[in-house]
Image: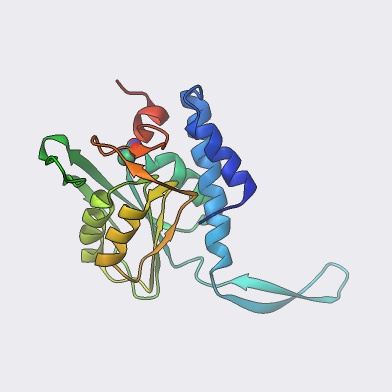
């Protein structure tokens, strides 16, 4: 969990029902950037030496794998989050997946929905890549598991990271059951999912709040 106070403060603004669309989107962008910093902490580094303008050598670091990042955004709510991630991973290869929760597929007593994947454009994934799949709300895990099933058709990376803003225990367990190697980054784990599949207390419909909706 990303417990940096700045991330928690931004999340608080996102949760607030009075936060308007533009501020909401900006908050997601800032969180994406912060999540990027967190991910970098887990990446391997090389020690290097450079010469400064004073003609003196200085020891430093180089982050490995910055050229081996693939970012997949799950449309549409992940767009601002990915805008932030790309500020850190500027050389990332990018893909998009459009996933729709089929509301009518919800069965009483079950939390899960069928997911319809309507568009997939993913670059080839190599075995030295770090795959980052961004979707701000990891509720039941139905969407992300369906997305991963499609994405892995393009190759198997050395690491698979899921970047969300709010997750639930149920969703995390569901993803890890199917993909035990996945690493999940989130700013909060909320206690409930309601009968409509929304995370509670959550922040509402992330796509509608970021881009406008009903
Ligand atoms: N998707 C959202 O946008 N919000 C939720 O609470 C759950 C899924």
Residue 59 drawn above or below residue 92: below
Q: Residue at x 11, y 41 (%)?
A: 107
Q: Position of residue 64 (x, y in %)?
A: 54, 73
Residue that appears at 39% across and 46% down: 191
Q: Is residue 155 above or below residue 151?
A: below
Q: Position of residue 163 (x, y in %)?
A: 42, 54
User: Which quadrant is the C terminus positioned in?
Assistant: top left
Asked if residue 83 shows in the view, the reply is yes
Left or right position of 38 against 166? right
**Quarter of the image where one finds residue 196:** top left
Q: Quadrant of residue 6?
A: top right
Q: Is residue 47 above or below residue 71?
A: below
Q: In this view, does 190 lie to the left or right of 74?
A: right
Q: Where is residue 72 in the image (x, y as percent from the top left)?
A: 35, 53
Q: In this view, does 104 lie to the left or right of 85?
A: left
**Residue at image x 37%, y 24%?**
212
Position of 59 compared to 141: left or right?
A: right
């Amino acid at each position: 969990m990303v417990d940096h106070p700045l991330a928690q403060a931004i999340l608080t603004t996102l949760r607030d029902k009075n936060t308007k669309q533009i501020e909401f989107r900006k908050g997601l962008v800032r969180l994406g950037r912060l999540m990027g910093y967190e991910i970098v902490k887990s990446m391997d580094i090389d020690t290097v030496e450079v010469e400064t303008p004073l003609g003196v050598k200085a020891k430093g670091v180089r982050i490995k794998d910055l050229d081996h990042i693939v970012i997949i955004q799950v449309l549409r709510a992940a767009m601002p989050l990915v805008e932030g991630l790309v500020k850190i991973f500027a050389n990332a290869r990018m893909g998009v997946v459009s996933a729709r929760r089929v509301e009518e597929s919800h069965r009483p007593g079950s939390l899960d929905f069928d997911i319809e994947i309507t568009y997939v454009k993913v670059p080839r994934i190599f075995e030295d890549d770090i795959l980052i799949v961004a979707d701000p709300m990891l509720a039941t895990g139905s969407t992300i598991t369906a997305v991963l099933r499609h994405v892995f058709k393009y190759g198997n990376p050395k690491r698979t990271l899921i970047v969300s803003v709010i997750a639930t225990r149920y969703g995390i367990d569901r993803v890890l059951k199917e993909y035990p190697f996945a690493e999940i980054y989130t700013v909060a784990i909320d206690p409930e999912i309601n009968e409509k599949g929304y995370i509670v207390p959550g922040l509402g419909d992330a796509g509608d709040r970021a881009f406008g909706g009903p």
